């Protein structure tokens, strides 16, 4: 009796706790997936005890630093950038969606990553992965791809020691290794048969999303390429605000249901980094004034990879030094409060209430004016306010805090990206 009693009590408590927040019973419909912040009550990755605001901001910034270095290293064509990790950072993705893998389906809460092509999940037996893994032995549709498979030519560092197509790569500051595999992946109610992904066997480092990554990049092994018939390389998302953890946003796959009245800017292609979504940032306005930025700081350069990308995984927008300094100085001049302080990597913080200007990103064909909620970080106590941007080594990254409560549409066939305000939290 005793052995049965325990799980029953646990189940009851579990279902009661779920009942308090019905949003957590994730039921996705059509081609729409709910998007959760990792700190959502529905997320298993939320910190076990709430972090203080300062701890949270500093940790997020440190994780961002690793990601921005990683993205910049992709641009500079260096393989691995050593990341000086002064302290232990538990890395996790910012936004997660539920994907069902295998037959019968096994739910995995995967990190949405627009700057990554491939999808990968931890598989049972994986060394260094989290405890929730995809149990491939229980799926009747699972296959391991061999070295002769055409897709094996697209994986990084393929090895064919055994018969399987094994690969390894860096992700953020971590390394991951696994076998190229295929199985059915079901997104909302859409099954995608024979979907090619990485079945992880080994990971090292702290930036591996615990239940895998769903890459929304546009390279050859991406979800977009593999679901071409179904979604026609079109998707959009609305990311909920970090300040409203109980809300979910949405990931809408395919052309149907996308906004009709929306402004677009062309997507640019860097042949060396085909997965990244480059856009043409031509200027930045602080309030009504166009900031004087050296053109080379924001110019797109397909041969070096410099320019501007839109990324769902970085939290705070990064601009290369000369652009950042010009924007920050213009912002400070507009705020007109002499006592500017810093917090971690943020250098434009105030300990008094401020009257902040809007900031407008001017892309070719589209201006996006951001209100305060996308620009300012307020401490819980309200005593500190920081401009939520920082400088970057080589690449401008329009990050997710600056995209929250906007619908961002990626229309790859027409090579354009659209942005419109939409309150999803
Ligand atoms: C979010 O939901 C939880 C219950 O799941 C509740 O305790 C908490 O107060 C809610 N937070 C907000 C900000 O509404
Ligand atoms: C990655 O694969 C290469 C061979 O392609 C191998 O030399 C290297 O040791 C592997 N790295 C890891 C971390 O497994
Ligand atoms: C991955 O490949 C290795 C080497 O070929 C093999 O030993 C292992 O069983 C494979 N695992 C899966 C899940 O296919
Ligand atoms: C998936 O793969 C299986 C086995 O290789 C094959 O029989 C089936 O036709 C494939 N299905 C699709 C939709 O490609
Ligand atoms: C500036 O702000 C800091 C931090 O809030 C505070 O300690 C300091 O007294 C302020 N200095 C002035 C001159 O107001
Ligand atoms: C963006 O703003 C600039 C400067 O305010 C203006 O000249 C330009 O026409 C605007 N572009 C669009 C596409 O609205």
Image: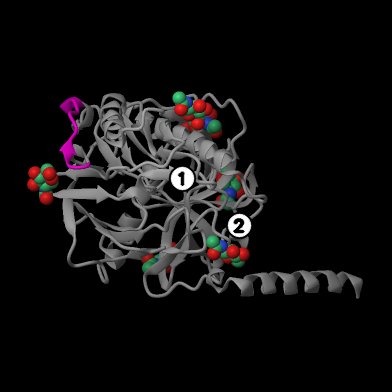
Left/right placement of residue 197 relative to residue 40 reads left
Residue 389 appears in which quarter of the rendering? top left
Residue 416 within the segment the image draws in magenta = no
Q: Position of residue 176 (x, y in %)?
A: 53, 39
* Element marked by disc 1: strand
Q: Which residue is mark 2?
A: 44
**Magenta region: which residues?**
287-296
Tell me the quarter of the image containing the N terminus. bottom right
Left/right placement of residue 17 relative to residue 120 reads right
Q: Is residue 275 above or below residue 417?
A: above
Q: Position of residue 205 (x, y in %)?
A: 58, 35
User: At 56% from the left edge and 74% from the top edge, which residue is drawn?
Assistant: 22
Residue 302 appears in which quarter of the rendering? top left
Predominant SS along the magenta part: loop
**Label 1: how many residues lie within 10 Å, few (<14), some (14-19) or many (20+)?**
many
Q: Nearer the viewer, residue 122 or 63?
A: 63
Q: Which residue is mark 1?
A: 378
User: At 57% from the left edge and 49% from the top edge, which residue is drawn?
Assistant: 210
């Amino acid at each position: 009796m005793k052995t049965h009693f325990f799980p029953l009590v646990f189940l009851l408590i579990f279902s009661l706790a779920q009942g308090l927040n019905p949003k957590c019973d994730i039921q996705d419909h059509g081609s729409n997936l709910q998007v959760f912040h990792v700190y959502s009550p529905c997320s298993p990755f939320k910190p076990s005890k709430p972090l203080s605001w300062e701890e949270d901001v500093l940790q997020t910034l440190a994780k961002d630093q690793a990601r921005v270095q990683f993205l910049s290293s992709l641009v500079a064509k260096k393989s691995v950038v050593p990341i000086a990790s002064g302290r232990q950072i538990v890395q996790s993705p910012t936004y997660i969606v539920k994907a069902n893998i295998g037959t019968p389906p096994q739910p995995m809460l995967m990190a949405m990553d627009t700057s990554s092509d491939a999808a990968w999940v931890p598989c049972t037996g994986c060394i260094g992965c989290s405890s929730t893994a995809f149990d491939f032995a229980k799926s009747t549709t699972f296959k391991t791809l061999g070295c002769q498979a055409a897709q094996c030519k697209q994986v990084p560092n393929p090895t064919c020691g055994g018969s399987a197509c094994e690969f390894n790569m860096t992700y953020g500051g971590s390394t991951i290794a696994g076998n190229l595999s295929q199985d059915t992946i079901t997104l909302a109610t859409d099954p995608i048969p024979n979907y090619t992904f990485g079945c992880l066997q080994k990971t090292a480092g702290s930036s591996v999303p615990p239940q895998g990554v769903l890459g929304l990049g546009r390279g050859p092994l991406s979800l977009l390429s593999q679901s071409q018939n179904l979604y026609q390389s079109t998707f959009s998302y609305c990311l909920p605000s970090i300040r409203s953890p109980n809300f979910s946003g949405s990931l809408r796959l395919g052309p149907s249901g996308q906004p009709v009245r929306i402004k677009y800017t062309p997507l640019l292609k860097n042949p060396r980094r085909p997965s990244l979504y480059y856009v043409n940032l031509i200027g930045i306005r602080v309030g009504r004034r166009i900031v004087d930025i050296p053109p080379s700081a924001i110019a797109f350069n397909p041969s070096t990879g410099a320019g501007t990308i839109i990324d769902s995984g970085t939290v705070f927008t990064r601009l290369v030094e000369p652009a950042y300094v010009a924007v920050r100085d213009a912002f400070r001049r507009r705020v007109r409060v002499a006592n500017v302080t810093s917090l971690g990597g943020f250098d434009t913080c105030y300990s008094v209430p401020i009257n902040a200007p809007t900031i407008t990103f001017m892309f070719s064909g589209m201006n996006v004016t951001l209100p305060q909620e996308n620009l300012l970080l307020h401490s819980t106590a309200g005593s500190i306010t920081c401009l939520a941007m920082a400088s970057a080594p080589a690449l401008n990254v329009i990050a997710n805090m600056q995209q929250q409560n906007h619908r961002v549409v990626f229309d790859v066939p027409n090579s354009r990206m659209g942005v419109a305000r939409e309150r999803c939290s």
